[in-house]
Amino acid sequence: MDDLSHYVAVERMRDSRPLEIRALRPDDRERLLSAVEHTSAQSLYRRFFGAKRQFTDKEIEFFLDVDFTSHVALVAVAEEAGERVIVGGARYIVTQFGQAEMAFTVVDRYQGQGIGAVLMRHLIGLVRKSGLAELTAEVLPDNAPMLKLFERCGLPLNMRREASAFHVALQLT
């Protein structure tokens, strides 16, 4: 497989602004923390299943320490007031042979611009190259936009309700 740490592609948001989809880099720490600061408590709750505004140094290092083999992370970067800012992200982490868990976040003011779908398409492309057979996610029942994203991604979907979340599995083979 190609070196995914140099992955980059240019897309367009629904309003036609350019959007760079690229590999998360170690020097993205401040941009990543800024994106968290600009994400609502509700969006963070939907991503982390709990109130999460601050992260420990260990958690931050975990998010930044991607090897692009068993832990792959992409970011969506847009220009805002002349600065390049992270407006969304997607990642997968291999959990067992042939399977990985995925997660997505889009900064609130950029939601509704198709960024989640763009990230999903790129993440699926990388997963296919990796040879994984299944992507999974846990989604809170009130996170209708994320559930719709999975339903519309074009892959066979298995979704079941568990105690406090939906377990989603996308089949790649």
Image (cartoon, grey):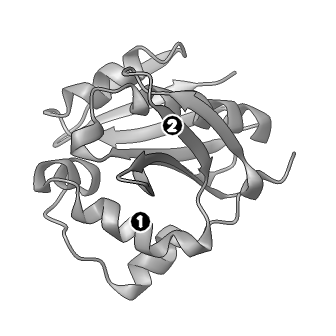
Residue at horizontal 53 percent and vertical 12 percent from the top? 154
Q: Label 1 vs label 2: CA separation?
A: 16 Å
Quadrant placement of the C terminus: top right
For residue 32, which numbered disc appears in the image? Answer: 1
Q: Are marks 1 and 2 in contact (CB under 8 Å)?
A: no
Asked if 135 appears above or below 77 in the picture, the reply is above
Residue 168 % position (x, y): 39, 31
Is residue 88 among what the camera can see? no
Q: Nearer the viewer, residue 69 or 159?
A: 69
Q: Amino acid at mark 2?
A: Leu
* Foreground: disc 1 or disc 2: 2
Residue 1 % position (x, y): 87, 45
Q: Amino acid at mark 1?
A: Leu
129 left or right of 149 in image: right
148 left or right of 125 in image: left
Residue at horizontal 16 percent and vertical 60 percent from the top? 50
Occupied quadrant, residue 165: top left
Q: Which residue is mark 2?
A: 19
Is residue 27 among what the camera can see? yes
Q: Label 2 neighbourhood size at 10 Å, few (<14), some (14-19), many (20+)?
A: many
Occupied quadrant, residue 21: top right
88 left or right of 144 in image: right
